Amino acid sequence: MAELLRRATRGPLSAYSAASKAWPLPVAFATCWVKGCASDLVTQKAVEQKPSVDWRRNLAFATFSGAYLGCGQHYIYNVLFTRWFGSALDMRTAVKKVVCDALWHVPMVYLPLYYMFEYTLLRDGPINGLRCYSEEWLDCMKPYWSMFTPFHLVNFRFTPPELRIGMIACMSFCWLVVLSYTSHRSYEAEHCLETTGAKNSASSE
């Protein structure tokens, strides 16, 4: 059974690896765009149990996922971290990359950019996005640290660079469900108030 599974996955993995080597940014963008779109759909329908999908929100979430979690993280993890810490697949190098990711990259670069992007597209501008992030950052970082610290330790220790973003995309589906729910709570509350207000105004007329 295990041998059958290895044979079944060897072809697609080899094809993905070859495509990622040949076209790293388009493959990373497409992988993470699909993942972002799917994770927000799960959040809206299964977690928040919305009667209909907010496609504007979903497109914004998927676009950031493709642009930053795909292309941006390819540069961070495979180019910048390699330049700073080396390309060795050993435990010492992996620990350095995990610490840098947990204490610098995600809390100081990734999430501030995400909140600025989301607030620019959906709400009232990047400054208010940063203000909201300053209130919610720990709610986002706690699940990230618990999920990604052990994962990245294994990923940076054993995974070749051309498969690293794909592996992160598989793991981060659950993380993006958490991020989508946490970061859109106030947005959904405001949207609900606006909808209720519009209905009350229409009924009073």
Image (cartoon, rainbow, N blue to C red):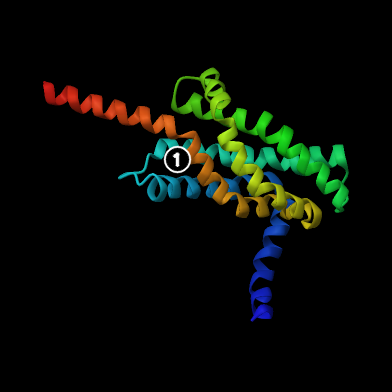
Residue to which mark 1 is pinned: 58
Q: How many marks?
A: 1
Say which of 201 and 117 sits in front.
201
The quarter of the rendered structure image containing the C terminus is top left
Q: Is residue 120 left or right of residue 199?
A: right
Question: Who's the residue at 38% across and 39% down the image?
Answer: 54
Q: In the image as oriented, which residue stretches furthest toward the bottom?
A: 1
Q: Is residue 81 visible from the viewing direction of this image?
A: yes
Q: Is residue 87 above or below residue 57?
A: below
Q: In the image as oriented, which residue stretches furthest toward the left?
A: 205
Q: Position of residue 195 (x, y in %)?
A: 27, 29
Q: Is residue 26 visible from the viewing direction of this image?
A: no
Q: Position of residue 93 (x, y in %)?
A: 86, 46
Say which of 203 and 143 sits in front.
143
Amino acid at circle 1: Asn
Q: Is residue 189 left or right of residue 90?
A: left
